[in-house]
Amino acid sequence: AFATAEETAAIRTRYAEGIAWGEMKQLLFEYINDHLKDMRQEYERLLAAPDHVESVLRQGAEKARAMTEPYMAEIRQAVGIRSLAGLS
């Protein structure tokens, strides 16, 4: 999943040459760690900005609500569910 065909061939060669499991595990760790570096940085950036994340989530919820409210009104009407807002 991570390795290209060339990288896979190089690893097979290393195994054929007798690479130790410990050395291979270290190479794999370094490769995956490097591959995930950008994602880890973005994750850390988002963790450091909870207000921004909350704002984006609220905006998404508002957008979704605006898109679904007309359909939900039709569905409520079709199944006979009245709005509770008018009941007091």
Image (cartoon, helix red, strand yellow):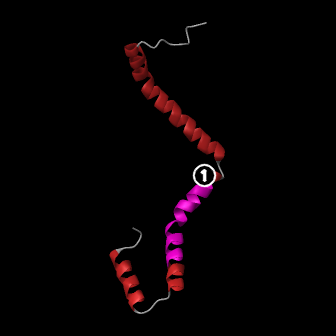
Side of 53 relative to 32 (left or right)? right
Q: Where is residue 67 in the image (x, y as percent from the top left)?
A: 43, 28
Q: Position of residue 26 (x, y in %)?
A: 54, 80
Whether 56 is drawn above or below 83: the answer is below
Identify the residue at horizontal 49%, vertical 82% (top origin): 24
Identify the residue at horizontal 37%, vertical 88% (top origin): 13
Instruction: Give the extent of the magenta segment.
Output: 28-45
Q: Is residue 33 magenta?
A: yes
In terms of secondary structure, what is the magenta stretch mainly? helix
Determine the image quadrant of residue 86.
Answer: top right
Q: How many marks?
A: 1
Residue furthest out toward the bottom? 17
Q: Name the residue under label 1.
A: 46
Q: Does the magenta stretch include residue 43?
A: yes
Q: Position of residue 20 (x, y in %)?
A: 50, 88
- Three-letter code for the amino acid on which mark 1 is drawn: Leu
